C-alpha cells in the first residue's frame, strides 16, 4: 500500500509547486504553466528543478505502483519514459521565442498526447476494478476531447491555464486510481 501514498505525495508536491509558480510569477489565465515559468531566469530555473525533483518519484510510482499492479502491456513503460523525457525537455527548454519555443511546444504537446494512451491502457486493464474504470474511462474521453479542441484552437484559449491544469490533474487522478482501484 506504500505506492498509492507515494503517488499522492508526489502529486501533492507537483501541485504545490505549480501553484507557487503561478503565484510567484503571475500572468493571466491564457498562459500555460510553462509560459509562467518562462518569464524570468529564476522562474525557468525553479520550473526545471521542480520537475527534476517530481518526475523520478512519480515515474517510479507509475512503474511499481500502477504497471506492476495492473499487469499492463509492455508498451506502457516506453510510453511513460517517453512522456517523462518530453516533460523534462519542456521543463529545461523555456518557451522564450525562436527555436526554444518550437522545441518546447513540440515536447509539451507530444508529452500531453502520450498521456492519453497511458490512461487508456490503465482503463482497459483487466485488473482494474469497476470503480477504477468508472474513474478512468471518462478521464480518457475528456483528454481525447481536449487534445482535439486545443489542436483546433491552436493552443490559444483565454482559460488555457485551467484547461492545462485540468488535463494534468485528471491524468494524475487516473494514475492514482490505477494504483488504488
Image: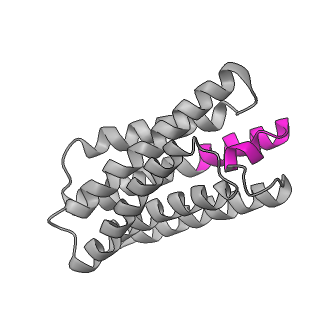
Q: Nearer the viewer, residue 100 or 21?
A: 100
Vertical order, 13 against 115 (above or below): below
Colour mapping: one colour
The residue most toward the front is 152
In magenta stretch: residue 39: yes
Q: Quadrant of the N terminus?
A: bottom left
28 sits left or right of 85 in the view: right
Picture coordinates of residue 172, whole percent (x, y): 46, 62
Please tell me whether residue 98 is drawn above or below residue 128 in the rendered image. Answer: above
* Extreme residue in the left direction: 126
Q: Which quadrant is home to the C terminus?
A: bottom left
Instruction: Residue at 44%, 48% (x, y): give it.
Output: 148
Is most of the magenta stretch helix, strand or loop?
helix
| Residue 11 x/y as whole percent | 54, 63
Above or below for 170 versus 104: below
Front-lying residue, 69 or 146: 146
Extreme bottom residue here? 131
- Name the residue: 76% across, 47% down: 36
In the picture, measured across the screen, residue 55 lies left or right of residue 61, that is: right
Locate residue 9, reporting x and y percent. Answer: 54, 67
* Boundaries of the magenta span: 33-53
The x and y percentages for residue 78 are: 31, 38
Please tell me which residue is depicted at 53% across the width and 33% down the height of the picture.
Answer: 107
Residue 51 falls within the magenta-colored stretch: yes
Amino acid at each position: 500500500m506504500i505506492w498509492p501514498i507515494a503517488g499522492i505525495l508526489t502529486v501533492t508536491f507537483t501541485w504545490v509547486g505549480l501553484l507557487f509558480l503561478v503565484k510567484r510569477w503571475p500572468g493571466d489565465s491564457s498562459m500555460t504553466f510553462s509560459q509562467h515559468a518562462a518569464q524570468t531566469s529564476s522562474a525557468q530555473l525553479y520550473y526545471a528543478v521542480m520537475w527534476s525533483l517530481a518526475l523520478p518519484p512519480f515515474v517510479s510510482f507509475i512503474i511499481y505502483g500502477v504497471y506492476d499492479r495492473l499487469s499492463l502491456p509492455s508498451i506502457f513503460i516506453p510510453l511513460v519514459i517517453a512522456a517523462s523525457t518530453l516533460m523534462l525537455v519542456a521543463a529545461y527548454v523555456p518557451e522564450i521565442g525562436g527555436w526554444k519555443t518550437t522545441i518546447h511546444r513540440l515536447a509539451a504537446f507530444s508529452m500531453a498526447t502520450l498521456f492519453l494512451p497511458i490512461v487508456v491502457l490503465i482503463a482497459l486493464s483487466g485488473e482494474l476494478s469497476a470503480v477504477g474504470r468508472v474513474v478512468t474511462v471518462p478521464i480518457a474521453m475528456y483528454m481525447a476531447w481536449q487534445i482535439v479542441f486545443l489542436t483546433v484552437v491552436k493552443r490559444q484559449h483565454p482559460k488555457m491555464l485551467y484547461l492545462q491544469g485540468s488535463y494534468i490533474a485528471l491524468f494524475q487522478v487516473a494514475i492514482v486510481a490505477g494504483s488504488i482501484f
